[in-house]
Amino acid sequence: MDIDARARVHAALGEPCRLAMVDELLLSDRTFQELAATAGLPGNLAAHHLAVLESAGLIERHVSEGDHRRRYISVRPERLEDLSALAQVPPGFVVFVCTHNSARSQFAAALWRRRMGSDADSAGTEPAARVHPRAIEVAAEYGLDLGRARPRSFDSLARAPELVISVCDRARESGQARFRPSLHWSIPDPVTEGSLAAFRSAFATVAARIDRFAAAAGSTQQ
């Protein structure tokens, strides 16, 4: 990043409301309304601050795969480089949720256990009959065995999680109160496209998200 671009990032983060928004987005993708509520700002002022962040290249927006009228806002961590605050590491038992529990949530639970060394599981709002074969294939490329994994419903979990992380827009928008406290990672469904490239992209996105938490855990333990 050149010095002018760095200056724009510093200027964008130099306002407490904008910095708080970025900190929130390091943990979870949010809608405009959610971010405005978190920051305690009226809509017009929240829109102004988000426009500044967008102009600096710090955030991006995309249409929900569930409710196509809704847009999620995501942070672009590569723009933060060493400027970002470390994301807080969620404590306790974490459950990852998507609609069919056949790819993204399975990736996330397996990666979380390996990278974080703590308990995690996955579930679906409408569980499929099996884990998608291409999800098993891609996981194996990275040394993760999903061959014996089976999709399950949230109700079938042996115990209640301390935190739920949805990795699917449709699951997030299902309106089920049991998803709180929760975070959301808006990750496109690789099953829709069906290619190995789509599954690899979903895996890489999940891995990058979890790596942020792993980095924070390593820092706090030093």
Image (cartoon, rainbow, N blue to C red):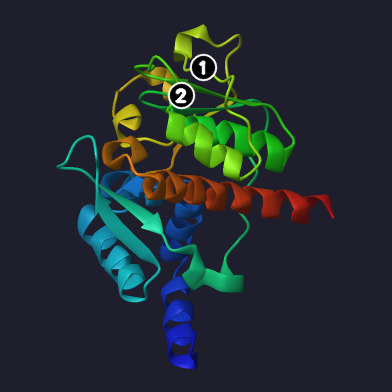
The amino acid beneath tag 1 is: Arg
In percent of width and height, residue 19 lies at 47, 64
* Left or right: 197, with 203 as reference point: left
Of residues 59 and 140, the one drawn nearer to the viewer in this rendering = 140
Residue 175 located left or right of residue 159: left
Please determine whether, in this image, residue 152 is positioned above or below residue 52.
Answer: above
Residue at 47%, 17% (x, y): give it.
Answer: 151
- Residue at 35%, 31% (x, y): give it: 172
Tag 2: amino acid: Val
Q: Residue at x 64, y 25 (%)?
A: 93
Figure disc tally: 2
The residue at the point 76 percent across, 56 percent down is 219
**Residue at label 1?**
150
> Crowding at label 1, few (<14), some or many (≥20) Cα neighbours within 10 Å?
some
Quadrant for the C terminus, please: bottom right
Q: Kindly indicate the quadrant of the structure image that contains residue 190.
A: top left
Mark 2 touches mark 1? (CB < 8 Å):
yes
> Most extreme residue toward the left, as rendered?
69
Residue 166 visible in the displayed image: no
- CA gap between label 2 and label 1 equals 6 Å
Position of residue 187 in the picture relative to residue 93 (left or right) = left
Numbered label attached to residue 47: none
Label 2 or label 1, whichever comes before in sequence order: 2
- Relative depth, front residue between 98 and 129: 129
At which x and y percent is residue 95?
Answer: 55, 26
State the image coordinates of residue 74 (x, y, percent, origin top left). Answer: 38, 55
Regarding mark 1 in the picture, which secondary structure is present there? loop
Disc ID at residue 131:
2
